[in-house]
């Protein structure tokens, strides 16, 4: 099963299964014989008389490569002998050529190489007899390499054949030493799997695509199958995390949001912050890896460019890290949670309606809630203020920024809007997904110290649907007179009664929407916080905190997912 998903760049038979590759037992060192000339060298170390590896390089470059070599020897790659050179950054192999007569032209040799930063595992390859455990005939060494094609990462195998135990042991130990020199690569991970995520396939995705790669890379995992909402949060805030180099979440955006909030909340507790007040948070101590197993996976798409479990796993294994801005959401002087996105109005109402129909299958429930909310589309009367991201000077400290952005801070930077709005969204990441390949907020980045504020004023239902449809098209979804966007550092939003708003915010001409706003009888208002429903009373303060969380991955400009159009609109 595992072999079929791998692509080998060895030219030999593919009958060598992955089960034949494992680490060798210690071998007592013994003297090796001298090498022979020509390309009939198989079981001995090569002498330095073999020309250094090259691929169309000049003689000076060959000399520099030879000086930097850690090891040099002969292996068969495919069916031909190659001169293999290992440096701290690269493994190069070149076809062994017969020696030319004195003064004759030196022919350009054929070869290839892999960068050591892309190698994530090395194993000794043996052929085992049926039913036999351990031992076996030595075949050589296998390197497992990460290859990139666009945003997608795949694992490939490089087979180096040599039958000498001593030769392979020296190379194996040296290759392991080079790999151990990459300090950012995790050795132990805490893994949370949401078994109910997206058709209940999350655990199968983890076992089939992620576990084999983690085992190859010798990563120890402590796996927890979550039993419900809040389970991962309780573990992250109550148990010791000292034995882990990172945390991995296998699930959808809701699961990722819970784990991210738990990591950041734990960091504040360890730093002695009062988590029930508004404070300047500290960065999470552990990076977070996201294995996509949900329906939209906006966080995974934003850091990987696509929903591909193998790509996500290889980013984790290789230690690729990306700092990410995170929002803090507070109300009435109390910190509520950390999040990547917050939606008020249409996004919150749709999620609240979907939550009352949980007896439906998830996909049907989402479509039903979307259509029902569109059918009864009503604006929200609110007042919101924001601080543009350009308002902070380069010399402003975090403490000064905290004073400016708190509710009692300086008001000169705040810009205010009042009126009827169908939707107000705040996002600290682009939120790429298959429905919106350029992102729900394409003008923000993962770590640009700003949030995207998107406010959709009251308009007709037909115009609002046009706006929604443009998220999945090349057209600019914000090119409407009723949509305004801002790059901001902080947002304050206060729902209000219609009588408290100015009279000049009347419904657009020709609109078929009733202008009366919807106000909850209990005084709370539904917010869509990273796909989770949060009923909040009163005014909400949202601030951005640069680089607060480290994710395994990289900043992506656009999702490479196949475009999915919403069938219901």
Image: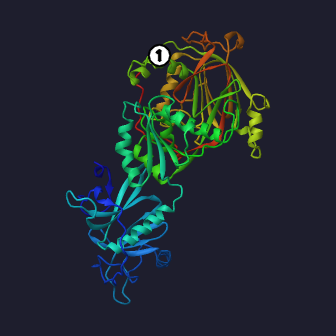
Furthest-left residue in this view: 130
Relative to residue 451, is residue 52 depicted above or below?
below
Nearer to the camera, 490 or 122: 122
Task: Mark yes or no: residue 531 visible.
Answer: yes
Relative to residue 383, is residue 104 depicted above or below?
below
Nearer to the camera, 361 or 450: 361
Indicate the position of residue 145 as horizontal and vertical percent values.
40, 58
Crowding at dot 1, Cα within 10 Å, few <14 / some 14-19 / many 20+, comes out as: few
Nearer to the camera, 378 or 286: 286
Nearer to the camera, 121 or 272: 272
* Residue indicated by mark 1: 356
Element marked by disc 1: loop
In this picture, residue 13 sits left or right of residue 437: left
Indicate the position of residue 337 as horizontal and vertical percent values.
61, 31
Residue ID at (35%, 38%): 204
Residue ID at (36%, 49%): 212
Q: To which quarter of the image does residue 407 belong?
A: top right
Residue ID at (36%, 43%): 207
Indicate the position of residue 2 as horizontal and vertical percent values.
30, 50
In this picture, residue 414 sits left or right of residue 100: right
**Numbered circles on residues, count:** 1
Quadrant holding the C terminus: top left
In this picture, residue 340 sits left or right of residue 367: right
Task: Mark yes or no: residue 11 visible.
Answer: no
Q: To which quarter of the image does residue 130 belong?
A: bottom left
Q: How is the image coloured?
A: rainbow
Relative to residue 289, is residue 67 depicted above or below?
below
Q: To which quarter of the image does residue 75 belong?
A: bottom left
Indicate the position of residue 281 as horizontal and vertical percent values.
67, 39
């Amino acid at each position: 099963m595992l072999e079929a998903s791998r692509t080998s760049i060895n030219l030999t038979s593919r009958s060598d299964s992955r089960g034949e590759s494992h680490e060798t037992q210690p071998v007592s060192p013994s003297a090796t014989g001298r090498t022979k000339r020509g390309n009939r060298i198989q079981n001995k170390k090569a002498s330095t008389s073999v020309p250094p590896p090259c691929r169309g390089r000049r003689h000076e470059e060959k000399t520099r490569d030879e000086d930097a070599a850690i090891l040099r020897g002969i292996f068969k790659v495919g069916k031909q002998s190659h001169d293999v050179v290992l440096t701290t950054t690269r493994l190069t192999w070149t076809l062994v050529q017969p020696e030319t007569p004195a003064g004759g032209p030196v022919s350009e040799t054929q070869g290839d190489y892999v960068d050591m930063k892309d190698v994530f595992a090395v194993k000794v390859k043996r052929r085992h007899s049926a039913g036999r455990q351990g031992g076996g005939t030595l075949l050589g060494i296998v390197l497992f390499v990460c290859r990139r094609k666009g945003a997608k990462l795949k694992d490939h195998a490089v087979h180096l054949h040599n039958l000498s135990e001593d030769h392979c042991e020296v190379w194996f130990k040296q290759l392991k030493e080079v790999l151990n020199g990459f300090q950012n690569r995790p050795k132990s991970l805490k893994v949370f799997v949401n078994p109910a995520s997206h058709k209940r396939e999350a655990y199968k995705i983890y076992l089939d695509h992620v576990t084999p790669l983690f085992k190859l890379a010798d990563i120890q995992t402590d796996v927890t199958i979550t039993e419900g909402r809040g389970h991962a949060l309780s573990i992250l805030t109550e148990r010791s995390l000292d034995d882990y180099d990172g945390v991995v979440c296998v699930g959808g955006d809701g699961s990722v949001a819970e784990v991210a909030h738990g990591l950041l909340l734990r960091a504040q507790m360890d730093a002695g912050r009062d988590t029930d007040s508004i404070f300047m948070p500290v960065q999470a101590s552990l990076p977070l890896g996201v294995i996509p197993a949900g329906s939209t996976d906006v966080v995974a798409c934003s850091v990987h460019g696509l929903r591909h479990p193998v790509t996500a796993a290889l980013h984790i294994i290789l230690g690729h890290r990306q700092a990410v801005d995170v929002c803090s959401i507070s109300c009435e002087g109390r910190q509520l949670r950390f999040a990547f996105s917050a939606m008020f109005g249409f996004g919150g109402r749709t999620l609240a309606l979907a939550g009352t129909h949980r007896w439906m299958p998830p996909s049907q429930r989402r479509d039903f809630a979307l259509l029902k909310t569109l059918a009864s589309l009503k604006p929200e009367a609110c007042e919101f203020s924001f601080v543009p991201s350009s308002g902070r000077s380069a010399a402003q400290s975090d403490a000064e920024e905290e004073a400016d952005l708190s509710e009692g801070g300086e008001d000169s930077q705040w810009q205010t809007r009042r009126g009827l709005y169908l939707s107000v969204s705040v996002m600290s990441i682009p939120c790429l997904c298959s429905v919106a390949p350029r992102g729900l907020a394409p003008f923000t980045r993962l770590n640009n110290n700003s949030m995207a504020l998107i406010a959709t004023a009251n308009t007709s239902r037909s115009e609002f649907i046009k706006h929604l449809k443009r998220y999945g098209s090349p057209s600019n979804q914000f090119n409407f007179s009723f949509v305004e966007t801002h790059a901001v550092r902080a947002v304050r939003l206060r729902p209000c009664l219609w009588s408290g708003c100015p009279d000049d915010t009347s419904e657009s001409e020709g609109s078929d929407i009733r202008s009366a706003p919807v106000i909850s009888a209990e005084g709370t208002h539904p917010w869509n916080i990273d796909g989770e429903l949060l009923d909040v009373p009163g005014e909400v303060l949202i601030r951005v905190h640069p680089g607060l969380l480290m994710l395994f991955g990289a900043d992506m400009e656009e999702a490479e997912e196949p475009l999915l159009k919403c069938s219901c609109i």
